[in-house]
Amino acid sequence: MTLWGLKTEASFDVWSIEHLIMGISVGCFSSWLAVKIIGNEEVSDNLKQKISFILTLMIAYMWETLETLSGNRTGRPNG
């Protein structure tokens, strides 16, 4: 098995990189949103991390739901 190539033959493909970058983006957005939700409250970093993690899971779940509902599992526009 090769390291980079087609999805059926390799460990990593274009979608692997896209998922990594999207995960970093959603994680950063969730961290920012968690701070905005909490506001000026004095809370522990642990609580901020938990809120950020929950937000990340919610966004990922919503994304997958939208993909499933649209019937678009390839990432290409319909039609």
Image (cartoon, rainbow, N blue to C red):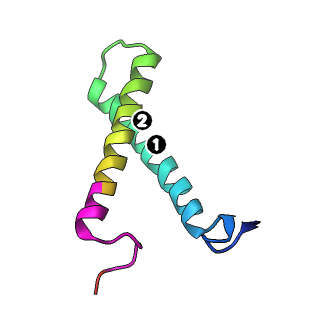
Is label 1 in a helix, a strand or a loop?
helix
Measured along the vertical axis of the image, is residue 78 above or below residue 43?
below
Q: Name the residue carrying label 2.
A: 31
Residue annotated with mark 1: 28
Image-based side of 40 in relation to 1, left or right: left
Q: Report which quarter residue 46 is drawn in.
A: top left
Q: Position of residue 64 (x, y in %)?
A: 33, 56
- Tell me the crowding category of disc 2: few under 14, some 14 to 19, or many 20 or more residues within 10 angstroms, Cα based: many
Mark 2 falls on what kind of element? helix
- Residue 40: name its quadrant: top left
- The relative height of residue 28 versus residue 78 in the rendered view (above or below) is above
Residue 62 falls left or right of residue 29: left
Say if 26 sits above or below 7 in the image: above
Give how far across and how far down residue 3 sits, in percent.
75, 64
Viewer-closest of 64 and 46: 64
Q: Residue at x 37, y 48 (%)?
A: 60
Cβ–Cβ below 8 Å for labels 1 and 2? yes
At horizontal 23% and vertical 64% (from top left) the residue drawn is: 69
Considering depth in this image, is 11 or 53 the residue closer to the camera?
Answer: 11
Kind of residue at badge 1 = Cys
Write down the quadrant of residue 9 in the picture.
bottom right
Q: Which mark is residue 2?
A: none
Viewer-proximal residue among 52 and 68? 68
Q: Position of residue 70 (x, y in %)?
A: 24, 69
What residue range appears in magenta?
A: 65-77
- Name the residue: 32% across, 48% down: 61
Residue at the outermost left position: 69
